[in-house]
Image (cartoon, coloured by chain):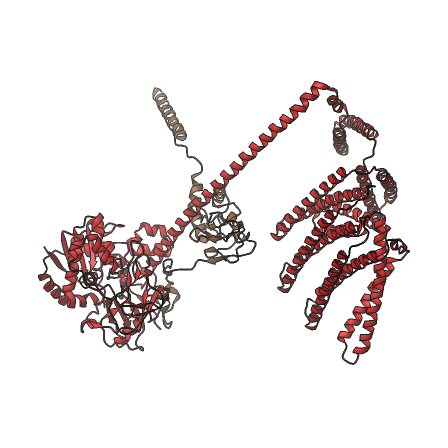
């Protein structure tokens, strides 16, 4: 019943098979270098078993399969592993993939190997494993691992085994030649496969253009015990397609999306059967294959038995290719193969043909034209698809529709492209569309995965939040319970003894409430007044009613105010000691108001306003008030009783809390600046405010600390603490400075910010230092400075000096190299010099106090004009600098006199400086005598000034909404700066 | 006359019956939530990058369902916009540059020598794709990374790079054929652009 059916479509391209069947299969030479891609098959790449440098023998397993669908790899010849590296592989993309590269030693020495004596004694599983370990894959083209197919009998009912010997694609004759020459081995292979699959019948499908192969097979089959049905099918492309051959031989159609095993059929290629037989009977793994070398560019088209990993170039040379004729090198057949442009690509397990085509043979595809809907493609499609429709969908990116038109059933045989009268590269469109759909699906899967993970994370965070909330609530409840328990106790005792004291405070007028009431009344009054005015303007009705309301409100507001005033008076009368803080605030407020008024007056004057007189009177009034307030405060301050240490500690705590807040806010602000947050301005304002508060707290603390009649003996531990603080601050400054220098060197954009940071740190350091110095100099008990301290100061001074020298040297270098950073560096040098002078001064002072008598200090309190001295020093410095510059710029002749001048000036500067220092020292001593830390004061004043400028700058760049806020901050800052500078000026 | 009355009564009766049926159906088969949000969410790339201005893909899906524009998703790019336009039956509009531009898919890579183990990136990662602990070097789980960029900014030592995903053999796609209409018949080597020639 040798019936043959038919499949839909198909084409008859020129066969071009005769050229390569004229000579028998020839052994290809062993190449010097073999390249074995780790992925020559469908499935996971194999995993190398050998290392670079390993000596290997022919047939040795060099890579193991990974996972179920994968294949082993064996050394095709003996040699050394020279690399495991990416190398171009036969792939349409022309990309590289990991390959084992073997340098052959030319001996071609086999590893010990022998076939299985009787494979039937082996279990099916063991035999399949043996085949798997022999690295056998489908030799037809796809390279599907054979062992997987041989396992199909386990979970499918396989009733038909089809041996595919159709070899339908033009040019290729590898299977044809194999069948002609090695039919016995093929039949042996079929027997092995039969043993594993146990099909009820076996079919061999072969095209009728291979009569010699048919004869050879028939001869081989004669000695075979199996009932093998050799069926010769008419030549038509693509009868070798798996599903097409099944249809041809059995008239069964494999459903879309299924494999042949689902309908009880398994297909194997003749080459695979041959390789299986070699492996099982001879113990030879798959290390070579038959490759057809053909095309018009080779002089001797023929079939080679080539080792896997042989570069194309070697085979082309063996077939005597003429490079001038070679136009295109196609791997595989002309219908389904692809062009490569690298002849170093190796032969792999699926390489059945190489076509070296000349231009006439395979001309470049003509330009594609518009589809004319001739419908030829539909008629030839072996998969019974609608190629034209698929083309539209692929071209129009309607991938969903393409998918629904069964794009994935396309076997990419190329029949449609072959017949296309418009030369449209249809298959390329389909391949592209398939790839797009696959990648879209992969992305969709990934997105879904990400969504799941995102939601899981969200749920986790929410759970954490809820847990935290629950814990917080529990804690709050606990605290409330404790609070209630505590409250209940005294209440119970109090109520049991005397209820009067509780009633008394309740009966007292609540000042705050009264104040609120008064202001509410005022606001209401104002609103009513406004409404009234509005009504009057517009001449509306109900004016009288409104007027009444206003009057009523007026009386109410007055009453409220009076009540409040009374209460206030009573309260202040009641409190024996005037609240110094309140007074101080009052005084400051009064001053601020006065300033505002003054400013208004000035601007009015400038603008020639007509309310100058009014403003003037107001200013005068305010002045009076401010003076009053100040006097009241001073009086209170003077009369303030000695502040007890607990109060001091409290103040200190306040101050520190304020400081901490400032620091936190500052950090937040810096973070915001760094992240370019839009809230920076607001935050700056907040920071300023906090800082103001902190300074207030600090001032209060300082005042309290300096006020006490009890001498503030500083304990040594405290001193050490301060010292540690100072050192820490210093270290920070140094670190920051180093970072800054690094930044400057690398031209980082953050330099400005960093400079500011350094300045800030330095300020902190100075503060710490001042505190330390004050503490060190304050103790009345031992006014003498210890020698150790002196040495320390000296060391500081020397270090500072060294720094100055270094900086100066750097500066000179910069000047010499004309660096653009000279200005900045000059400033740095100046700063360093200042530090050095400071250190020197500290040292001198310490030395002075140490050596001289304490009495020397008041003696030096002669009215020395410090400012004049300072000016003198700076004038000297400027002159010196000028002279130095001149010296540098001057040429050799003019140098000596200039040098002398510089020296002289230097001496003068030093003397002036010394005088200044002495005066300064005296001043500090005087201030210390008055109980004021002059340095601290200076620092404070400088800080206040800095704040003023900062606020001014912020104001300049602020918009109108933030402006008012800033203006207030500015006024505050200004008043504080003025205050401080006034205090300072008292000592200067 | 009675015919008219009968007709009216019949219609009334039908109206009552259908009203009851519809009323029951609207209660019994009530759809929870807005199903269109799920459909939109399924089209979004789920990078959870927040470039659209919403804290994740689902909030943006909800915003789209509420009438927001569909062109705010740079990771999804034009293809997502087209898919959304298709779903919502609106005009496909070009991507809004304000929210970033379409970049090739990339994944985060932590230069592990430079990582200080601050865990900031771990907290920023919306899909828990970064592995690490405090003071321990972190690393990105490549298969989980959506390339959303969110970990780059918080890194205090800037040790995170966004590396475009390279095409491998398994992700390589056949190129779109060049429209042949661009070639003219006298072009030398015509068609070689389509097929690639062997030099």
The residue that appears at 68% across and 66% down in the rendered structure is: A821
Residue A400 shown left or right of residue A842 in the figure: left
Residue B57 relative to residue A473: left or right? left
Q: How many marks?
A: 0
Q: Position of residue B8 (x, y in %)?
A: 37, 23
Q: What letter labels the chain drawn in brown?
A: B
Q: In front here: A357 or A888? A: A888
Q: Is residue B38 visible?
A: yes
**In the figure, residue A37 lies in which quadrant?**
bottom left
Q: Is residue A571 above or below residue A598?
A: above
Q: Residue at x 18, y 72 (%)?
A: A24
Chain A hue?
red
Q: Position of residue A402 (x, y in %)?
A: 33, 52
Q: Is residue A948 visible?
A: no
Q: Is residue B92 above or below residue A640?
A: below
**x then y, percent, for residue B112:** 50, 57
Foreground: B54 or A109? A109
Left or right? Give the position of A978 relative to A328: right
Q: Where A775 sits versus A274, above or below?
A: above
Q: Is residue B146 above or below residue B4?
A: below
- Which corner quadrant holds the N terminus of chain A? bottom left
Question: Depth check: A48 or A861 in front?
Answer: A861
Given residues A547 and A22, the one toward you in this image is: A22
Image x and y of residue A822, in percent:
70, 67
């Amino acid at each position: 019943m040798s019936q043959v059916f038919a499949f839909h479509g198909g084409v008859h391209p020129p066969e071009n098979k005769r050229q390569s069947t004229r000579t028998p299969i020839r052994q290809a030479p062993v190449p010097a270098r073999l390249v074995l891609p780790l992925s020559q098959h469908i499935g996971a790449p194999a995993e190398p078993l050998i290392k670079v440098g390993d000596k290997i023998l022919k047939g040795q397993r060099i890579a193991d399969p990974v996972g179920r669908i994968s294949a082993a790899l064996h050394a095709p010849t003996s040699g050394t592993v020279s690399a495991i590296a990416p190398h171009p592989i036969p792939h349409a993309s022309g990309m590289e993939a990991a390959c084992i590269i073997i340098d052959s030693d030319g001996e071609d020495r086999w590893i010990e190997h022998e076939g299985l004596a009787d494979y039937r004694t082996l279990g099916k599983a063991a035999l399949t494993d043996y085949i798997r370990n022999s690295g056998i894959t489908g030799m037809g083209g796809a390279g599907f691992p054979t062992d997987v197919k041989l396992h199909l009998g386990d979970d499918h009912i396989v009733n038909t085994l089809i041996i595919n010997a159709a070899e339908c694609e033009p040019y290729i004759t590898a299977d044809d030649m194999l069948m002609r020459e090695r039919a016995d081995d093929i039949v042996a292979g079929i027997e092995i496969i039969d043993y594993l699959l146990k099909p009820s019948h076996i079919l061999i499908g072969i095209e009728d253009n291979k009569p010699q192969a048919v004869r050879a097979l028939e001869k081989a089959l004669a000695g075979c015990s199996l009932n093998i049905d050799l069926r010769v099918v008419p030549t038509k492309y693509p009868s070798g397609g798996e599903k097409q051959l099944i249809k041809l031989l059995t008239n069964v159609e494999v459903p879309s999306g299924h494999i042949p095993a689902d309908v009880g059929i398994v297909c194997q290629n003749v080459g695979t059967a041959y390789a299986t037989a070699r492996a099982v009977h001879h113990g030879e793994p798959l290390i070579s294959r038959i490759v057809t070398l053909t095309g018009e560019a080779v002089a001797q088209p023929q079939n080679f038995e080539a080792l896997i990993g042989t570069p194309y170039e070697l085979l082309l040379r063996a077939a005597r290719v003429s490079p001038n004729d070679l136009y295109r090198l196609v791997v595989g057949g002309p219908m389904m193969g692809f062009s490569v442009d690298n002849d170093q690509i190796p032969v792999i397990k699926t390489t059945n043909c190489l076509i070296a085509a000349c231009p006439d043979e395979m001309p470049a595809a003509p330009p594609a034209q518009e589809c004319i809907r001739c419908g030829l493609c539909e008629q030839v499609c072996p998969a019974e698809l609608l190629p034209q429709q698929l083309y539209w969908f692929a071209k129009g990116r309607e991938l969903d529709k393409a998918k629904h038109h069964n794009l994935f059933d396309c076997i990419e045989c190329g029949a449609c492209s072959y017949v296309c009268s418009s030369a449209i590269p249809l298959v390329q469109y389909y391949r592209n569309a398939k790839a797009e759909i696959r990648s879209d699906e992969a992305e969709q899967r990934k997105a879904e995965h990400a969504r799941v993970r995102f939601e899981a994370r969200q749920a986790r965070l929410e759970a954490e939040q809820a847990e935290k909330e629950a814990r917080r609530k529990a804690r709050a409840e606990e605290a409330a319970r404790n609070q209630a328990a505590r409250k209940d106790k005294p209440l119970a005792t109090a109520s049991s003894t005397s209820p009067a004291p509780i009633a008394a405070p309740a009966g007292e007028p609540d000042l705050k409430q009264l104040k609120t009431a008064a202001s509410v009344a005022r606001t209401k009054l104002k609103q009513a007044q406004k409404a009234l005015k509005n009504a009057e303007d517009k001449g509306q009705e109900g004016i009288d009613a409104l007027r009444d309301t206003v009057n009523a409100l007026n009386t109410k507001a007055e009453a409220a105010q009076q009540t409040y005033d009374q209460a206030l008076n009573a309260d202040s009368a009641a409190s024996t000691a005037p609240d110094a803080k309140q007074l101080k605030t009052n005084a400051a407020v009064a001053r601020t108001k006065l300033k505002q008024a003054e400013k208004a007056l000035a601007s009015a004057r400038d603008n020639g306003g007509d309310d100058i007189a009014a403003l003037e009177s107001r200013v005068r009034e305010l002045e009076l008030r401010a003076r009053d307030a100040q006097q009241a405060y001073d009086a209170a301050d003077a009369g303030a009783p000695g502040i007890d240490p607990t109060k001091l500690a409290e103040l200190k705590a306040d101050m520190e809390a304020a400081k901490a807040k400032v620091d936190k806010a500052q950090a937040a602000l810096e973070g915001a600046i760094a992240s370019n947050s839009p809230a920076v301005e607001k935050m700056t304002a907040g920071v300023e405010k906090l800082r103001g508060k902190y300074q207030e707290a600090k001032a209060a603390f300082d005042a309290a600390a300096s006020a006490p009649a009890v001498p503030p003996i500083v304990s040594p531990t405290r001193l050490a603490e301060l010292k540690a603080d100072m050192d820490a601050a210093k270290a920070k400054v140094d670190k920051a400075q180093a970072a800054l220098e690094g930044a400057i060197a690398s031209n980082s954009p953050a330099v400005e910010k960093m400079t500011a940071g350094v300045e800030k740190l330095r300020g902190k350091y100075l503060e710490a230092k001042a505190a330390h110095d004050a503490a060190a100099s304050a103790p009345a008990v031992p006014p003498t400075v210890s020698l150790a301290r002196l040495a320390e100061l000296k060391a500081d001074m020397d270090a500072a000096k060294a720094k100055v020298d270094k900086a100066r040297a750097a500066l000179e270098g910069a000047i010499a190299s004309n660096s653009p950073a000279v200005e900045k560096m000059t400033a740095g040098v100046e700063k360093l010099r200042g530090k050095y002078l400071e250190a020197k001064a500290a040292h001198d002072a310490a030395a002075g106090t140490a050596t001289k008598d304490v009495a020397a200090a008041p003696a030096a309190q002669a009215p020395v004009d410090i400012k004049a001295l300072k000016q003198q020093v700076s004038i000297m410095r400027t002159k010196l600098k000028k002279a130095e510059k001149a010296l540098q710029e001057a040429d050799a002749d003019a140098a000596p006199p200039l040098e002398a001048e510089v020296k002289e000036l230097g001496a003068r500067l030093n003397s002036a400086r010394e005088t200044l220092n002495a005066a300064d020292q005296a001043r500090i001593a005087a201030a210390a005598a008055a109980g004021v830390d002059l340095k601290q004061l200076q620092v404070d004043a400088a800080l206040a000034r800095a704040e003023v400028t900062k606020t001014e700058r912020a104001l300049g760049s602020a918009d109108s909404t933030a402006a008012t806020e800033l203006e207030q901050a500015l006024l505050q800052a200004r008043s504080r700066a003025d205050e401080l500078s006034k205090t300072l000026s008292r000592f200067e | 006359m009675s015919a008219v009355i009968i007709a009216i009564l019949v219609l009334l009766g039908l109206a009552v019956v259908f009203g009851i049926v519809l009323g029951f159906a609207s209660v019994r088969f009530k759809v929870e939530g807005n199903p269109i949000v799920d459909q939109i969410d399924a089209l979004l790339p789920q990078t959870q990058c927040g470039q659209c201005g919403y804290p994740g893909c689902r909030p943006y899906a909800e915003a789209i369902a509420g009438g927001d524009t569909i062109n705010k998703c740079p990771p999804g790019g034009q293809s997502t916009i087209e898919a959304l336009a298709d779903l919502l039956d609106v005009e496909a509009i070009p991507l809004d540059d304000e929210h970033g531009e379409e970049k090739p898919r990339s994944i985060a890579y932590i230069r592990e020598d430079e990582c200080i183990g601050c865990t900031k990136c771990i907290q920023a990662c919306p899909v828990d794709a970064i592995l690490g602990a405090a003071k321990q070097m972190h690393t990105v789980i490549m298969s989980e990374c959506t390339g959303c960029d969110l970990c780059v900014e918080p890194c205090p030592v800037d040790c995170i790079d966004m590396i475009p995903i390279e095409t491998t053999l398994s992700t390589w796609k056949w190129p779109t054929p060049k429209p042949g209409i661009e070639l003219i018949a006298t072009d030398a080597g015509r068609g070689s652009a389509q097929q690639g020639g062997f030099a």
